[in-house]
Image (cartoon, rainbow, N blue to C red):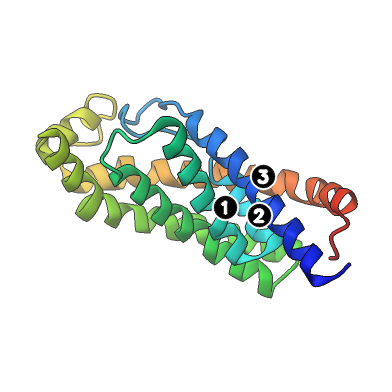
Amino acid sequence: MNRKTINTKTAALAGMLGAISAVLMMIDFSLPLFPSFMKFDLGELPALFGGFFLGPTAGCLIIVIKMLLKVLVKGTSTAFVGEFMNIVASVCYVLPASLIYKRDHTKSGAKKAMVISTIFTGIVCVFLNAYVSFPMYGRLYGLSMEAIVGMAAKVNPLVHDNMTLMLFSVFPFNLLKYGVTSVLTYLIYKRTGNTIRRIMDFQS
């Protein structure tokens, strides 16, 4: 198989994974103990799969495709604040995991990659929400931080100020979101990856 054919197939697979990622992102829902504005979805699963299968660059490309398709289909209700935050968080999750797995292409390497990226993204999301996302949402919707804290406190009694909002709402939510994504990716990666290789004749 020549390089042009491989690149074409890689682009086609990345586009397909981006479309699946967009669909999964739009199937979102709230979780108990977390405020309704924090939505759980599995949109990063195809991106992480693609990052492992095709490499870090492809994983990031899938994230961009996901967001472009989401905006084309549903538009934005956050003046693109939510979309920008999603891209940053997704890259913080997919890129480190893909780079680690690329260096340690083993089952233990995959586990290590996903654990490190899940924790790293959870920490990054705390700072993103505390200093960028929540203040921007507040200005956009005319909400104070006290009002945002109050929304979280209604469903989680541990939340009573900005710090507890981050520690007991934002951080555990993202650990759960990316942790579930990691576990599902780990469960499907080998079998699905082998199937794709056979169908598309990818060279391992």
Q: Residue at x 60, y 65 (%)?
A: 56
Measured as percent of width and height from the top left, residue 135 is found at 16, 47
Q: Kindly identify the amino acid type of the residue bearing the numbered disc 2.
A: Gly
In the image, residue 20 above or below residue 89: above
The amino acid marked with disc number 3 is Met
- Could you say which disc has been placed on residue 16 in the image? 3
Tally the numbered discs. 3
How many residues crowd around disc 3 within 10 Å: few (fewer than 14), some, or many (20 or more)?
Answer: some
Q: Is residue 93 left or right of residue 76?
A: right
Location of the C terminus (image quadrant): bottom right
N-terminal of the pair, mark 3 or mark 2, is 3
User: SS for tag 3?
Assistant: helix
- The quadrant of the picture occupied by the N terminus is bottom right
Where residue 59 sits, quadrant-wise, is: bottom right
Q: Are discs 1 and 3 less than 8 Å apart at CB?
A: no
Residue 176 visible in rendering: yes
Q: Please, is residue 162 above or below residue 4 in the view?
A: above
Q: Position of residue 132 (x, y in %)?
A: 22, 53
Circles 2 and 1, Cβ within 8 Å, touching? The answer is: yes
Image spot of residue 117 (x, y percent): 51, 60
Taking depth in this image into account, of 128 and 141 the one nearest to the observer is: 141
Q: Secondary structure at mark 2?
A: helix
- Image disc number at residue 50: 2
Marks 3/2: CA distance?
10 Å
Q: Amino acid at mark 1?
A: Ile
Q: Residue at x 57, y 41 (%)?
A: 21
Q: Of the residues tagged 2 and 1, which is closer to the observer?
A: 1
Circle number at residue 62: 1
Pick whichever of labels 1 and 3 is earlier in the sequence. 3
Residue lying at 45% horizontally and 47% vertically, measured from the top left: 175
